[in-house]
Image (cartoon, rainbow, N blue to C red):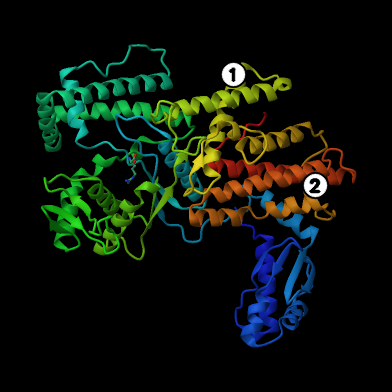
């Protein structure tokens, strides 16, 4: 496992050394290097430095050039404009660096220098309720963030904070006691995971509706339900057993949906709201004793100077209601204590809808005031925007109901399967293979559409666009990958991918090569800011560079002879591996044949 410095890092280092050799008085000044259209890189750090030293930037730049050691990395460097440096690296350096990447299983991506422990709170649906598109976002973004952080060497603890507690369970449990067979499954041994998940959800839906109707119309049932809540909170065994039945039924469903999403959710990581019940009273006591929370009209509240309602009155975070009940905030505050103290987390990431931002702002601030979050632990809400329908309004069915997540996924898979069937006619795929790839393409399309815009933004759920072969879609990336695999398969026995640093590169090869070299730096930025969309953008550009390369540079019939064939196969292979690794970090499959 060798981390490979990028060309940008190498050039940066050379320039920094030359700068301090030419101008010892400059100290450790930053040459400010960036990618450029004029040359491979441009450095404009000389401008601000000259201002500081009251010198002439062009003269300064010329001095830096003089101090550069003759070497094989920088092929050309010139002073331009007011004192920029335009730098071209040698073809040899590009291929050598890429060869070092190719020799490493991690493509030269280093592990984080100081890995810590991050708890990622994501994929948190609610018990006895349908999963909708909002749950899609949390699951997809969270899964990508987990993969990216783990790849960087961070220790990640996953937490699925499912909504499994609350007064609605009184009504549900009471109804089930009075109608004991409502959650029974058909005894069908041939049923697969998807079917039993569906059956569980449709039972839960039916029960929910019936219980609700009774609760709203029958005062006596309402009263029995209220008493049931008290039993539940008191830990009555029979009541708890029935509550668990609801949780288990729902999990059956959740797991079937996550499975369709090609996502691994592990049972021990599902620690729902109920998992913090034992901590709630203490959390409130600590908050009250420390003075961070105060009693106001019987409720335990935390106040904030900058949080006010439309009437100008402060809106507090309520940790305990006046009737003694604990809510969402008490649970989240307890979860912070657990995650920091027991899980030893340095960072807490919450992948949750932006509409809950005020809640998290108040919860984090409360935790800071009492010292549960401090300088060494930071909490961050990776807030995501709303999924919109084609009309630009929040996604609803024609009847105005929220759209079921599974229905969307099934439709995406159907569309993708049609695309795969049409495109793969001459590949001779079996029905089973078409179905498998259809799922990989369809689910990939949904994930990619979500991950390729920055999380905070709303986006339109448009399946036509998502499964399109052209444009910024996962299908485009998957086809680029499969096309490379097909070239590698078609290569004859003597034609192997092999780097030839001695060969001159065509412009399209250089562009592809320089982009490949940026993979590690991109990942570093992506991990540091929890920004999978930047990885998606990188991969899309990679596929675009590859497309240009493929148009301009024949691979198996390269005009420069066998060494050039090998060198181009090498570029193909490294592109494929980079695409594969990058897509894997987004949770998207790259089929070998499409
Ligand atoms: N179950 C909640 C919902 O569906 C999301 C939970 C978010 N996580 C948390 N720690 N509050 O809206």
Residue highlighted by disc 2: 567
User: Measured along the vertical axis of the image, is residue 513 above or below residue 194?
Assistant: below
What's the residue at 39%, 36% (across, down)?
266
Q: Position of residue 472 (x, y in %)?
A: 63, 41
Nearer the observer, 457 or 519:
457
Please tell me how crowded label 1 is: few (under 14), some (14-19), or many (20+) other residues with Cα within 10 Å.
few
What's the residue at 20%, 48% (across, down)?
279
Q: Quadrant of the C terminus?
A: top right
Residue 78: assigned label: none
What's the residue at 24%, 40% (across, down)?
274
User: Measured along the vertical axis of the image, is residue 536 above or below residue 429?
Assistant: below
**Label 2 vs label 1: CA separation?**
36 Å
Determine which quarter of the picture holds residue 429: top right
What's the residue at 13%, 56% (across, down)?
296
User: Measured along the vertical axis of the image, is residue 464 above or below residue 448?
Assistant: above
Q: Secondary structure at mark 2?
A: helix
Q: Name the N-terminal-most of marks 2 and 1.
A: 1
Q: Secondary structure at mark 1?
A: helix
Residue highlighted by disc 1: 432
Q: How many marks?
A: 2
Split into quadrants, the picture shows ligand 1 in the one at top left
């Amino acid at each position: 496992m060798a981390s490979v410095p990028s060309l940008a890092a190498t050039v940066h280092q050379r320039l920094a050394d030359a700068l301090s050799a030419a101008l010892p008085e400059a100290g450790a000044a930053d040459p400010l290097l960036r990618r450029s259209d004029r040359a491979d890189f441009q450095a404009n750090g000389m401008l601000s430095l000259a201002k500081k030293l009251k010198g002439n930037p062009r003269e300064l730049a010329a001095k830096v050039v003089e101090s550069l050691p003759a070497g094989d990395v920088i092929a050309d460097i010139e002073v331009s404009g007011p004192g920029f440096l335009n730098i071209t690296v040698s073809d040899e350096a590009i291929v050598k660096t890429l060869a070092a990447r190719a020799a490493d299983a991690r493509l030269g991506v280093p592990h984080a220098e100081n890995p810590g422990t991050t708890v990622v709170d994501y994929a948190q649906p609610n018990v006895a309720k349908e999963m909708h598109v909002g749950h899609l976002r949390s699951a997809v973004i969270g899964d990508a963030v987990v993969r990216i952080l783990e790849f960087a060497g961070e220790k990640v603890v996953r937490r699925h904070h499912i909504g499994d507690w609350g007064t609605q369970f009184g009504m549900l449990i009471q109804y089930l006691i009075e109608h004991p067979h409502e959650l029974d499954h058909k005894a069908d041994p041939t049923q697969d995971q998807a079917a039993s998940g569906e059956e569980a959800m449709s039972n839960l839906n039916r029960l929910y509706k019936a219980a609700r109707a009774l609760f709203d119309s029958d005062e006596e049932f309402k009263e029995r339900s209220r008493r049931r809540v008290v039993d539940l909170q008191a830990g009555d065994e029979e009541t708890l057993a029935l509550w668990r039945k609801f949780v288990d039924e729902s999990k059956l469903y959740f797991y079937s949906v996550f499975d369709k999403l090609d996502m691994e959710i592990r049972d021990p990581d599902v620690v729902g709201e109920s998992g913090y019940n034992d901590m709630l009273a203490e959390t409130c006591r600590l908050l009250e004793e420390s003075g961070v929370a105060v009693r106001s009209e019987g409720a335990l509240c935390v106040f904030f100077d900058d949080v006010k309602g439309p009437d100008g009155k402060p809106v507090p975070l309520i940790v305990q209601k006046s009737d003694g009940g604990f809510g969402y905030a008490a649970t989240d505050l307890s979860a912070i204590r657990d995650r920091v103290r027991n899980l030893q987390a340095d960072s807490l990431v919450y992948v949750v809808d932006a509409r809950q931002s005020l809640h998290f702002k108040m919860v984090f601030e409360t935790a800071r005031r009492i010292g549960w979050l401090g300088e060494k632990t930071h909490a961050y809400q990776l807030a995501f925007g709303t999924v919109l329908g084609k009309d630009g309004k929040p996604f609803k069915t024609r009847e105005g109901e929220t759209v079921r997540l599974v229905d969307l996924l099934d439709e995406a898979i159907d569309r993708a399967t049609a695309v795969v069937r049409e495109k793969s006619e001459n590949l001779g795929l079996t029905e089973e293979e078409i179905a498998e790839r259809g799922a990989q393409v369809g689910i990939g399309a949904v994930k990619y559409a979500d991950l390729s815009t920055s999380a905070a933004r709303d986006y339109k759920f448009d399946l036509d666009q998502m499964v399109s072969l052209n444009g910024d879609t996962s299908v485009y990336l998957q086809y680029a990958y499969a096309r490379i695999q097909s070239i590698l398969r078609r290569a004859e026995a003597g034609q192997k991918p092999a780097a030839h640093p001695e060969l001159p590169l065509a412009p399209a090869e250089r562009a592809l090569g320089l982009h490949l070299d940026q993979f590690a730096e991109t990942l570093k930025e992506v991990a540091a800011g929890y920004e999978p969309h930047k990885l998606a953008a990188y991969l899309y550009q990679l596929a675009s560079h590859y497309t240009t390369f493929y148009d301009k540079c024949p691979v198996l019939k390269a005009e420069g002879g066998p060494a050039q064939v090998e060198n181009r196969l090498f570029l193909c292979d490294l592109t494929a591996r980079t695409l594969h690794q990058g897509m894997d970090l987004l949770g998207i499959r790259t089929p070998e044949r499409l």
